[in-house]
């Protein structure tokens, strides 16, 4: 399987689906991470905190865009290596972008058609009314995927390409079953327990935005822990699908067939991140 992630900022790929990507990398799937911005502004803690000091380090305060971005890209490259992402592509637009740009949609479409992924993962576009950079990124990503599907060799010099499925990440766990009237819900959970240590280690690389150490463990314990509780495993990443699925028969997962509802709390509680992966 070929998987492409399309996110606004460098760390988004890891926080949203780093564990899922690690599991796919382990079974030999090909993964490309497309990141729309250079990541220089988002959570620039290292620089903000240095400026707050009485005697800030000149090497830090004199850093320009090139140095700030190079540092973020080096963090991302290390995280990608840990997770097993084969290739990282950064389009290097400004982080603060919050309006849709047709040229960026074109760039996304070209990368989608070049790599030809079966699956694309992106943020759920949470607030299309007052879009933030994540929602804008996903609106552009969806349009990029659709644009690749309308390539015509006569006009574009290349054939149309269709993505098979899009998984939206980043929704909180609000409801776990379909009878609720509270609206949108995650419908797909990936058990990341076997690779959770790699997600911790990948987040530990993002030192400049203070995602390392205690924050990495807290975020994964709370967010992926809550997804895990809903999924009946220790840690999970949650997604909802864009397209319906068609099966020859009614699908029931291996997990659903194997799980013991009476003892699943034991499995859910087995790994404590701060003890297992101290920082
Ligand atoms: Zn982000």
Image: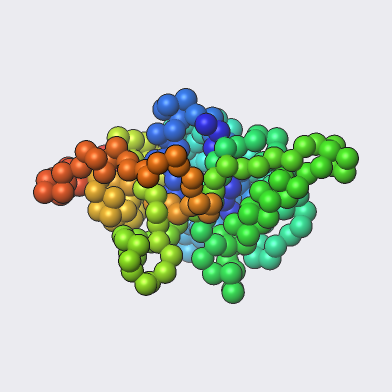
Q: Which residue is drawn at 11% across and 49% down?
A: 262
Q: Residue 136 vs residue 226: left or right?
A: right
Say which quarter of the image contains residue 277. Answer: top left
Q: Which residue is drawn at 61% across and 43% down?
A: 163
Residue most extreme to the right:
154
Q: Which residue is drawn at 57% across and 42% down?
A: 164
Residue 263 makes an appearance in the image:
yes
Image: 126 above or below 78: below
Residue most extreme to the left:
262
Closer to the camera, 37 or 111?
A: 111
Image: 241 above or below 277: below
**Quarter of the rendering occupied by the C terminus:** top left
Residue most extreme to the top:
28
Residue 99 x %, y %:
68, 65
Closer to the camera, 273 or 146?
A: 146
Closer to the camera, 121 or 252?
A: 252
Q: Residue 40 vs residue 172: left or right?
A: right
Q: Residue at x 45, y 42 (%)?
A: 247
Residue 193 x %, y %:
29, 40
Residue most extreme to the front:
249
Residue 60 makes an appearance in the image:
no
Q: Residue 167 vs residue 185: left or right?
A: right
Q: Residue 238 vs residue 272: left or right?
A: right
């Amino acid at each position: 399987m070929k998987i492409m992630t399309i996110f606004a900022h460098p760390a988004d790929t890891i926080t949203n689906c780093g564990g899922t990507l690690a599991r796919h990398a382990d079974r030999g799937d090909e993964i490309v991470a497309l990141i729309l911005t250079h990541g220089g502004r988002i959570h620039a803690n290292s620089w903000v905190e240095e400026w707050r000091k009485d005697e800030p380090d000149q090497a830090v305060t004199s850093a320009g865009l090139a140095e700030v971005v190079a540092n973020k890209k080096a963090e991302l490259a290390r995280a990608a290596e840990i997770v097993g992402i084969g290739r990282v592509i950064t389009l290097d637009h400004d982080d603060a972008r919050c309006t849709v740009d047709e040229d960026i949609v074109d760039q996304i479409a070209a990368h989608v058609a070049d790599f030809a992924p079966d699956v694309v993962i992106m943020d759920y576009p949470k607030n299309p009314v007052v879009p933030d950079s994540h929602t804008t990124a996903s609106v552009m990503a969806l349009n990029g995927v659709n644009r690749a599907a309308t390539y015509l060799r006569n006009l574009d010099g290349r054939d149309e390409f269709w993505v098979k499925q899009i998984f939206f990440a980043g929704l909180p766990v609000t409801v776990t079953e379909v009878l609720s009237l509270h609206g949108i819900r995650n419908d797909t959970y990936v058990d990341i327990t076997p690779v959770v240590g790699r997600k911790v280690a990948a987040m530990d690389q993002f030192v400049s935005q203070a995602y390392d150490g205690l924050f990495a463990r807290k975020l994964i314990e709370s967010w992926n822990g809550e997804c895990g509780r809903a999924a009946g495993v220790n840690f999970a990443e949650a997604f909802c699908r864009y397209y319906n699925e068609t099966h020859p028969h009614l699908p029931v997962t291996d997990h659903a067939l194997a799980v013991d509802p009476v003892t699943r709390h034991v499995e859910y509680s087995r790994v404590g991140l701060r003890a297992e992966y101290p920082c």
